[in-house]
Image: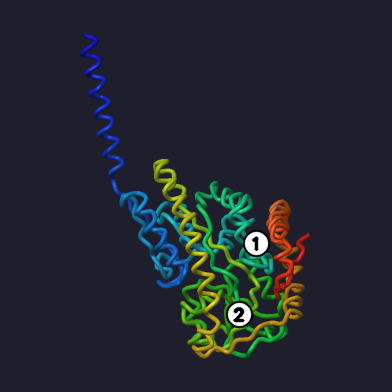
């Protein structure tokens, strides 16, 4: 009798193992949306992410990358992820302020002075804390890619001073803080989904826009914009975000694969972005753009005009969030203040404005 029970137990274990094996062998394909076209560092990074996931899962997990905003705007994709019809998105972290107001802090002008500071903040406790806020909104933050520092283009005139910006109709990411900082420069902000920007520039419905050099080049804005000003006024991290419905349906092993792949792809993607950005000024000049650069005094003036905007949105973001970011920036700057760094040529960009 004992022998019969033992055999029955073995049979159940065998059936269970077979079932588990079958589950593990099932393939899963996830949809990943990005706004930028093929060839842009964000899209190339997304493709690298897909390669890493496929390799780590032995082909079980597949990531289909939908580039060029084919699945809709970042806001539309966020809604689709909450509903579970799109699995993943890589988009501007600041746009997530529509879900969690604190994310507007990623659109604060002149908050970061260099990419090392940005890396320390988004990869550290602050970046993780911000992504944790998304869970209650049906989203899961896995890590950060990078769009980079934003610069201005327009079709009307070269920009050499802050006053030159006044009167321009500038497309901005649709969020209150972007509307506010453009108004603070006496310019006219036009909120617009990214997919509409090239056509609006071409028809001169708007005078200009602001984006990192990689975006300006990849989307061929030089065809419809002749003036580029290197202002580096906002740094844009890009959040790698997954639908919580999709995340909760995955095994622990698959979640581990996706988390590790995000970390590896993020490193690759940021290095690619920075390499391309360093080379693109000459490329854009060769494509007919007139490139100007604000003098340190003008950048300081620009930053000073941003102080009231930062103070205003510091309230809606939450002073606790602002204080945590300031603490992380202080640590990053102290860590960078070695004798070797102190001897290096100082950056022309102004320090981040106080937000208190």
Any part of residue 349 in sight: no
Image quarter in which the N terminus is found: top left
Instruction: Please tell me which residue lies in front, 341 or 249.
Output: 341
Task: Report x, y in % for residue 227.
Answer: 58, 87
Task: Report x, y in % for residue 217.
Answer: 49, 79
Task: Report x, y in % for residue 202.
Answer: 49, 86
Q: Give the image quarter of residue 63.
A: bottom left
Image quarter in which the C terminus is found: bottom right
Q: Residue at x 45, y 72 (%)?
A: 40
Instruction: Please tell me which residue lies in front, 149 or 194.
Output: 149
Q: Which residue is mark 1?
A: 117
Q: Which residue is mark 2?
A: 152
Any part of residue 40 in sight: yes
Instruction: Please tell me which residue lies in front, 63 or 179.
Output: 63
Q: Earlier in the sequence, mark 1 or mark 2?
A: 1
Q: In the picture provided, is 326 more to the left or to the right than 170?
A: right
Q: Which mark is residue 324?
A: none
Would you call the spot at circle 1 few (<14 residues within 10 Å), some (14-19), or many (20 or more)? some
Would you call the spot at circle 2 few (<14 residues within 10 Å), some (14-19), or many (20 or more)? many
Q: In the picture provided, is 73 more to the left or to the right than 26?
A: right
Q: Residue lying furthest right in this view?
A: 356
Look at the numbered disc 1 and give the secondary structure of its residue.
Answer: helix
Q: Give the image quarter of residue 151.
A: bottom right
Task: Report x, y in % for residue 39.
Answer: 42, 73
Q: Residue lying furthest top in this view?
A: 1
Q: Residue at x 50, y 59 (%)?
A: 266
Look at the numbered disc 2 and give the secondary structure of its residue.
Answer: strand
Q: Residue at x 54, y 70 (%)?
A: 274
Q: Residue at x 76, y 80 (%)?
A: 297
* Cα–Cα gap, marks 1 and 2: 22 Å
Q: Give the image quarter of residue 152.
A: bottom right
């Amino acid at each position: 009798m004992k022998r019969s029970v033992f055999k029955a137990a073995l049979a159940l274990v065998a059936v269970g193992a077979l079932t588990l094996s079958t589950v593990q062998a099932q393939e899963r394909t996830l949809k990943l949306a990005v706004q930028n076209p093929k060839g842009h560092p964000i899209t190339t990074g997304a493709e690298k992410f897909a390669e890493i996931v496929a390799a780590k899962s032995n082909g079980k997990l597949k990531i289909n990358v939908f580039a060029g905003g084919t699945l809709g705007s970042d806001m539309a994709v966020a809604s689709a992820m909450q509903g579970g019809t799109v699995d993943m998105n890589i988009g501007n972290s600041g746009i997530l302020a529509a879900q969690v107001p604190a994310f507007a802090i990623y659109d604060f002008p002149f908050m970061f002075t260099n990419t090392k500071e940005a890396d320390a903040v988004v990869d550290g406790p602050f970046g993780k804390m911000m992504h944790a806020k998304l869970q209650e909104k049906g989203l899961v933050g896995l890590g950060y890619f990078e769009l980079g520092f934003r610069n201005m283009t327009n079709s009307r005139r070269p920009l050499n001073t802050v006053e030159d910006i006044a009167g321009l109709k500038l497309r901005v990411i649709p969020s209150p803080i972007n509307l506010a900082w453009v108004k603070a420069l006496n310019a006219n902000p036009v909120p617009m989904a990214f997919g509409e920007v090239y056509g609006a520039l071409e028809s001169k419905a708007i005078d200009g826009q602001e984006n990192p050099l990689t975006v300006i080049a990849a989307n061929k804005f030089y065809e419809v914009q002749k003036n580029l000003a290197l202002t580096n006024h906002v740094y844009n991290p890009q959040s790698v975000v997954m639908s919580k419905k999709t995340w909760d349906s995955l095994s622990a092993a698959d979640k581990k694969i996706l988390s590790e792949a995000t970390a590896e792809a993020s490193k690759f993607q940021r290095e690619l972005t920075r390499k391309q950005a360093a080379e693109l000024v000459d490329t854009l000049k060769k494509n007919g753009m007139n490139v100007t650069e604000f003098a340190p005094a003008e950048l300081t003036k620009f930053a000073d005009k941003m102080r009231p905007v930062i103070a205003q949105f510091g309230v809606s973001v939450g002073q606790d969030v602002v204080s945590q970011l300031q603490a992380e920036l202080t640590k990053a700057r102290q860590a960078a203040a070695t004798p070797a760094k102190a001897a290096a040529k100082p950056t022309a960009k102004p320090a981040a404005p106080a937000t208190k």
